[in-house]
């Protein structure tokens, strides 16, 4: 099992180019199924969730060329419309293959998706939305079968602005005859990227970034060329690394607007953050100040994918911080591991009360989910002594070369496979 071994204490200093965004790349790879023409994706992140998604596309019959700075995907010969159970269980984001598969083949069969252990993560919003588009959904033996011969535009209201459901339904509707309106849609930047790609393909999508998205279905769609935007969560993770190690890190290739909530919170914690057009510098001297309240929410609220990293910063803050996880129903699994490192945290339901301590101490801890694992690495960077982060392969799902980038910034960290 992969471990990361960290000797804490180094101030991280230097600069880093932020990788392409996992959560923009994954739906756009799925969109390759909406066309029989080749698609090209630049600045793709070399992370296991992307490799798994590409394996699913190849299982369906797509051809993928892996080049250093670009992927070329040709789905002309794709003909299978069922998702491989093993791979679908690997990543939850396989769920938004359903929309494109239905749009292309008018049929889809899959099992309940896997992914991080961060709560129940049902797919009811996806399925209810597809039914609003005339899809017949049946379940048997843990498999879901979607029959979409009568796929057509329709009115959808999402009970919750689900990112994946919004993306899935945008892609299904992009080739459903007639107009579709998605009410209470997610507003994440990744939704705007998907709209750009579908429109580049000849589709007609309006309203991404707002709560109401309108889609005109098309008979067929063309290929596309896309360059992945920077990963706002990876950027945020390195911003917290500067804060907890009292260092100074410059991040190149960022979109500052996507980081507003994180920047605001880290400034509240006392960090000096200088923002440039496509870069920013985070500098921290002394322990962070307490953060009155960090509550996660749909974009542009505070991102849930940064909640664990903020728990680490709050663990060594001067004072008591409150963290409320309002998006997921079980996303505090990193707290138990931080307690092993000497943190003083009390959780009750979706609230964590974090009383900062002078220093964390090294311990052997376990990665429970992707961002929780990253948060434990950050804790190891500022802890006294040695921290061993087990199950670290889970971190590879979202971070390419995490430990070598940290080492480049001065961290004493190594991997043991
Ligand atoms: C996306 O997951 C991201 N993943 C997640 O990032 C991110 O945490 C999440 O959005 C919220 O921002 C990708 O984009 C690949 P949701 P997704 O549907 O689409 C509930 C990471 O670390 N829900 O917006 O699965 C759900 O249980 C990952 O990069 C339903 O109840 O998130 C959750 O509580 C982790 N029914 C809430 O909505 C549904 O049908 C938000 O989920 C769908 C979701």
Image (cartoon, helix red, strand yellow):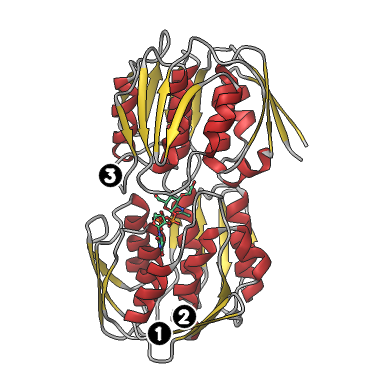
Marks 3 and 2, the one that precedes in the sequence: 2
Marks 1 and 3, the one that precedes in the sequence: 1
User: Where's residue 234, x and y in %?
Assistant: 48, 37
213 left or right of 4? left
Q: Quadrant location of ligand 1?
A: bottom left
User: Where's residue 283, x and y in %?
Assistant: 40, 16
Name the residue that disc number 1 marks: 135
Disc 2 element: helix
Nearest the eye: 393 or 196: 393
Name the residue that disc number 3 marks: 300
Residue at point 54%, 25% (across, down): 378
Give the Cα distance between marks 1 and 2: 9 Å
The residue at the far front in this view is 348
102 left or right of 406? left
The N terminus lies in quadrant? top right
Res 227 visible: no
Nearest the eye: 383 or 253: 383
**Quarter occupied by residue 186:** bottom left
Res 153 visible: yes
User: Where's residue 323, x and y in %?
Assistant: 37, 32
398 left or right of 327? right
Q: Are marks 1 and 2 in contact (CB under 8 Å)?
A: yes
The C terminus lies in quadrant? top right
The residue at the far bottom in this view is 149
Give the Cα distance between marks 3 and 2: 30 Å
Residue at point 37%, 61% (across, down): 194
């Amino acid at each position: 099992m992969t471990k990361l071994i960290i000797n804490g204490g180094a101030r991280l200093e230097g600069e880093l180019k932020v990788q392409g965004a996992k959560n923009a790349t994954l739906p756009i790879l799925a969109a390759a199924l909406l066309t029989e023409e080749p698609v090209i994706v630049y600045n793709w992140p070399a992370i296991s969730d992307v490799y798994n998604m590409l394996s699913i596309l190849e299982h369906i019959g797509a051809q993928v060329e892996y080049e250093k700075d670009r992927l070329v995907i040709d789905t002309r010969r794709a003909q299978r419309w069922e998702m491989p159970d093993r791979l679908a269980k690997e990543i939850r984001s396989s769920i938004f293959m359903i929309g494109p598969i239905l749009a292309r083949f008018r049929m889809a069969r899959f099992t309940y998706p896997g992914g991080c252990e961060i709560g129940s993560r049902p797919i009811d919003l996806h399925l209810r939305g597809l039914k609003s588009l005339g899809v017949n959904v049946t379940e048997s033996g843990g498999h879901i079968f979607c029959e979409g011969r009568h796929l057509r535009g329709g009115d959808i209201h999402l009970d919750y602005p689900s990112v994946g459901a919004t993306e899935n339904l945008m892609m299904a509707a992009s080739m459903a005859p007639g107009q579709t309106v998605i009410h209470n849609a997610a507003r994440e930047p990744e939704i705007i990227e998907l709209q750009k790609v579908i429109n580049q393909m000849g589709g007609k999508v309006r309203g991404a970034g707002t709560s109401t998205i309108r889609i005109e279905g098309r008979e067929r769609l063309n290929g596309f060329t896309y360059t992945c935007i920077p990963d706002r969560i990876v950027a945020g993770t390195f911003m917290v690394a500067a804060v907890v190690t009292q260092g100074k890190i410059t991040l190149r290739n960022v979109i500052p607007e996507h980081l507003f909530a994180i920047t605001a919170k880290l400034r509240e914690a006392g960090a000096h953050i200088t923002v440039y057009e496509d870069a920013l510098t985070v500098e921290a001297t002394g322990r962070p100040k307490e953060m009155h309240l960090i509550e996660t929410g749909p974009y542009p609220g505070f991102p849930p994918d940064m909640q664990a990293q903020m728990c680490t910063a709050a663990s060594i803050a001067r004072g008591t911080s409150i963290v409320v996880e309002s998006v997921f129903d079980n996303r505090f699994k990193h707290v138990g591991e931080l307690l092993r490192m000497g943190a003083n945290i009390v959780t009750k339901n979706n609230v964590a009360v974090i009383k900062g301590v002078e220093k964390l101490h090294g311990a052997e801890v376990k990665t429970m989910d992707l961002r929780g694992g990253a948060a434990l690495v950050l804790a190891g960077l500022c802890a006294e002594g040695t921290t061993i982060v087990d199950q670290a392969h889970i971190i590879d799902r979202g971070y390419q070369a995490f430990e070598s980038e940290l080492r480049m910034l001065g961290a004493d960290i190594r991997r043991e496979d």
